[in-house]
Amino acid sequence: MRAIIIGATGLVGKELTQLLDKNSFYESIEAYGRNLKVLEGVKLTKTKIKIFDSVEKLSLGPEDHVYCCVGTTIKKAGSQENFIKVDYEIPLELSKLCQTNQVAKLIIISALGASASSKVFYNRVKGEMEEHCRANFSKTVIIRPSLLLGERDEQRIAEGLGQFLMPLLNPLLQGSLKKFRAISAREVARSMFEVANYGRTNIAIDYVVD
């Protein structure tokens, strides 16, 4: 079985690449990203690092698990239109390709609060992405993390403040509120693997799986 990681140079993608490389579950791994310098110095034994150009150039097979870790912000993207190209269009095209090639599973990172009916632009785009990807390909798993904890290459002021405050609030979020806790990129990566392969995870995170 092979793992394909799209967005391997992002916060979660990098953690997922390292996690799967150390795991014996997959025979081989292909990790695609746009800023390959992020993975320089990372010790990998069975992972092929490749530049991500477009979804249509990917070669997928029926035994593949495809992990989609792409994501940006409107500020970094420069506009809502460019944000949609990354957070909506890439997963959407990927779901179509997965259906065409009948891959084993597609696992996508979304966001807590995603809803196609939301009045918040970010949440609405994420919600529409979820609905359309699952409509295109029934074997789609959705992972919805809360605020991500971890070191990014670029500075995000709001997230930086959140990373400082949320760990202080996490102990107060108990029971059904645990999914609102800030979560490390490493835990998100592990939850992606566990939900994809076992249908569940003990990590406090929201997810959708058939």
Image (tube, grey):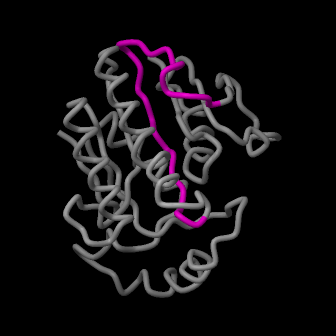
Residue 185: say if magenta: no
Residue in the image at 71% along x and 31% along y: 44
Residue in the image at 49% along x and 81% along y: 166
The image shows residue 162 at horizontal and vertical percentages of 54, 80
The image shows residue 1 at horizontal and vertical percentages of 44, 17
82 versus 28 height, above or below: below
39 versus 120 height, above or below: above
Residue in the image at 31% along x and 16% along y: 100
174 to the left or right of 58:
left
Total of numbered circles in the picture? 0
37 versus 59 height, above or below: below
Residue in the image at 48% along x and 19% along y: 2
The image shows residue 4 at horizontal and vertical percentages of 50, 27
Q: Residue 173: name its quadrant.
A: bottom left
- Which residue sits furthest right? 41
- The quadrant the C terminus occupies is top left
- The stretch in magenta equals 52-75
Residue 55: say if magenta: yes
31 versus 178 height, above or below: above
